[in-house]
Structures are given as structure tokens and as C-alpha cells.
Amino acid sequence: MKDQDTFWAVIKSGIAWIGVLLGSLTTAKVAILLTIFYTVLQIYVLVRDKIIKHEALTNTDDL
């Protein structure tokens, strides 16, 4: 019985923390997070396409 009480206490605590986290999100925070994510994604694509593929092309020309 004590194991079940502990289990439900953890579940209820987790639900409370999820509620706090979701309740603290505002539209402005979501917009900033999405903007940061998009910017990091664009940087990754730029590095991948322009720098790494360019180096691969220049290395094959040396052969």
C-alpha cells in the first residue's frame, strides 16, 4: 500500500510541475523560443551546405 501512495504522490507532483511550466509560458516566450530554434536551424543548414560541402568539393579537386 505504501508503494502505491509513493507512486501517486510522484504522479501528482509531476502533474503539478507540468502545470506550473505550462502556466508560465506566454505567447512572447513561445515566440522567442521558436525564433531561437529557427535561427539555430538556419545556422546549421548554412554551415552544412556552404562550408562542409564546399570543403568536400575542394578536396576532390586535389585528387
Image (cartoon, grey):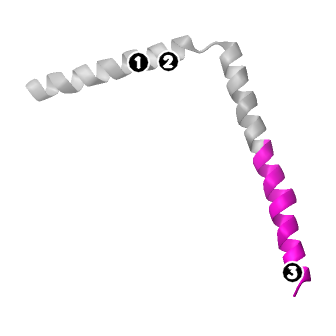
The residue sitting at 38% across, 15% down in the picture is: 16
Amino acid under label 3? Thr
Q: Is residue 1 visible?
A: no
Cα separation, mark 2 vs mark 1, equals 6 Å
In the picture, the disc for residue 39 is: none
**Dot 1 alpha-carbon crowd within 10 angstroms: few under 14, some 14 to 19, many 20 or more:** few
Label whose residue precedes the other's in the sequence (3 or 2): 2
Vertical placement of 14 versus 38: above or below?
above
Circles 2 and 1 in contact, beta carbons < 8 Å? yes
Residue placed at 41% from the left, 18% from the top?
Answer: 17
Q: What span is colored magenta in the figure? A: 42-63
**Chain-order first, disc 1 or disc 3:** 1
Q: Secondary structure at mark 1?
A: helix
Residue 43 in the image: state x and y as whole percent.
79, 45
Whether residue 60 appears in this view of the structure is: yes
Of tags 1 and 3, the one toward the viewer is 3
Q: Which mark is residue 21?
A: 2
> Looking at the picture, how far across and down is residue 53, in whole percent?
84, 65
Residue at left offset 80%, top offset 54%: 47
63, 2: nearer the viewer: 63
Disc 3 or disc 2, which is closer to the eye?
Answer: 3
Which residue corresponds to mark 3? 60
Q: Residue at x 70, y 14 (%)?
A: 28
Image quadrant where one finds the C terminus: bottom right
